[in-house]
């Protein structure tokens, strides 16, 4: 947000200008017609890895139900999608990390991993991460 006010924060969220994090801080997120760039506010001694995740046009649209131990469909469970949905398109340790669009992507999002343990993890051994909202190329 441009300023720390409820209205500015709501406008930024409605425009998709936010990211989720469990500790990784991002300096800047940029999208042009040609590329998607994520700049990490790196901490000394911490290593980072960025994955650009997306789904390409022409992906396998087949789905399957999730099954319980007896092989019966689970009620109200999401379906299993093809591995082509949300696949890793590129991975890098560069900072800033950038992905060059090919024109075949339906969307692209970035997920940043660090090798620093979370201060208040859900599960013991969880590392800090950040994930950015998907964008259309």
Image (cartoon, rainbow, N blue to C red):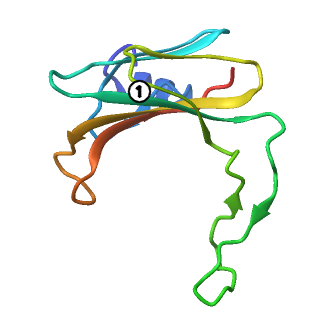
Residue for point 23% across, 54% down = 125
**Whole-percent x, y for residue 80 in the image:** 68, 62
Quarter of the image for residue 112 reads top left
Residue for point 68% across, 45% down = 85
**Whole-percent x, y for residue 42 in the image:** 25, 20
Q: Nearer the viewer, residue 11 or 81?
A: 81
23 vs 86, left or right, is left
Secondary element under disc 1, as helix, strand or loop, is: helix
Quarter of the image for residue 130 reads top left
105 vs 131, left or right, is right
Q: How many dots with numbers?
A: 1
Pick the quarter of the image with the C terminus.
top right
**Whole-percent x, y for residue 57 in the image:** 80, 34
Q: In the current view of this chain or complex, which residue is farthest to the bottom?
A: 70
**Above or below — where is 128 with respect to 51?**
below
Q: Nearer the viewer, residue 37 or 115?
A: 115
| Mark 1, residue position | 9
Q: Nearer the viewer, residue 117 or 31?
A: 117
Residue for point 79% across, 42% down = 59
**Above or below — where is 67 with respect to 47?**
below
Residue for point 72% across, 53% down = 82
């Amino acid at each position: 947000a441009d300023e720390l006010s409820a209205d500015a924060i709501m406008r930024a969220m409605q425009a998709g200008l936010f990211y989720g994090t469990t500790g990784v801080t991002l300096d800047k997120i940029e999208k042009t017609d040609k590329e998607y760039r994520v700049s990490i506010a790196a901490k000394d001694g911490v290593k980072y890895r960025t994955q650009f995740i997306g789904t390409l046009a022409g992906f396998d649209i087949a789905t399957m139900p999730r099954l319980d131990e007896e092989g019966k469909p689970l009620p109200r469970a999401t379906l299993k999608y093809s591995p082509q949905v949300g696949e890793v398109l590129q991975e890098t340790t560069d900072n800033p990390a950038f992905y060059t669009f090919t024109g075949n992507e339906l969307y692209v999002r970035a997920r940043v991993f660090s090798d620093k343990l979370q201060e208040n993890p859900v599960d013991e051994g969880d590392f800090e991460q950040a994930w950015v909202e998907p964008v259309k190329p």
